[in-house]
Amino acid sequence: MTYAAIEQEAILLKAVWDMIDDMVNFEIFQYPVTSRPTNLLFESGSHKRVFAILLADFLAQPKPSALPFAFAPSGQASRETDRTYLFYLEAIGRQPQLGPDASGLAAAASAFADWLNAECYCPAVWLSELDLSLDLRVSRIWLLKVVGDANKHNFSRLGERVKQIRKMLARHGHDIDEGRVYRTLPDFHHWFYRDVFSYHASTIAEFLDQIRRALFDYLEKVCSKLRVRTRIEAVASAVRRGLIDPG
């Protein structure tokens, strides 16, 4: 089945909206008790774990064969975020279909992508199993993917991540046997998940909410252009005008 470009965009935006709604809400986070800027707190450890897993899915590369999108994955993938949904949002910003201007959405996606691709400095990380203390420098997106996978899977399904961690340690001057890397996974969980991930959670939620707000603004303009009140009515109006093939 083939899809028109406008349908492909609508499906992608629906997918992104649903994923962000699942992550950023008052079931996952506690309702702030102040109107002043503050850090968000998770409702529980289980909610924190769910957030980490869902975020890793959002930062994963969608399988092209399973997506009815016109946007092919970046061939060069010069940035790690080119293999995430953010790549598609930036593509929509360059060539929107539903409305004339999606620059706000592209800006929100690009801001998050820039933050994710930046290096995260973790000083004095203590790996007790290796009797090793070191200053780690890794991209934020890689760290978040490792955290998400470690919360989603048992250690027996983390073979690829263990190989990546081993390569990362080698870049920092330490050639560690793969078996020992497995044994030090609890240390990485402590530093990356309990400390670094917790520290960045509010910032991540804010970036996601900014994308959601930009998405709402974009679709609100679409509804206004079509002189309808809801997104459902916008789709119905587009069908009537022949912009979308209902079949």
Image (cartoon, rainbow, N blue to C red):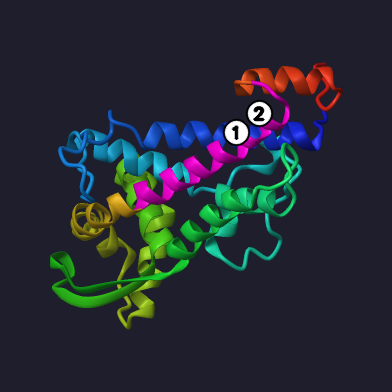
* Residue 241 pos. (x, y %): 85, 22
* Residue 88 pos. (x, y %): 64, 49
Q: In front here: 129 or 207?
A: 207
Q: Do the residues bearing badges 1 and 2 touch, measured as CB atoms within 8 Å?
A: yes
**Which region shows up in magenta?**
204-228
SS for dot 2: helix
Magenta-colored stretch includes residue 222: yes
User: Residue 240 occupies which quadrant of the picture?
Assistant: top right
Q: Is residue 153 visible?
A: no
Q: Which mark is residue 223?
A: 2
Q: In front here: 7 or 68?
A: 7
Q: Is residue 158 visible?
A: yes
Callout 2 environment at 10 Å: few (<14), some (14 to 19), or many (20+)? many
Residue tagged 1: 220
* Residue 137 pos. (x, y %): 34, 74
In the image, what residue type sits under mark 1? Glu
> Can you say whether 122 is above or below 113 in the image?
below
In the image, what residue type sits under mark 2? Cys
Callout 1 environment at 10 Å: few (<14), some (14 to 19), or many (20+)? some
Left or right for 149, reference 35: right
Q: Main secondary structure of the magenta part?
A: helix
User: Residue 33 occupies which quadrant of the picture?
Assistant: top left
Q: Which mark is residue 103?
A: none
Magenta-colored stretch includes residue 210: yes
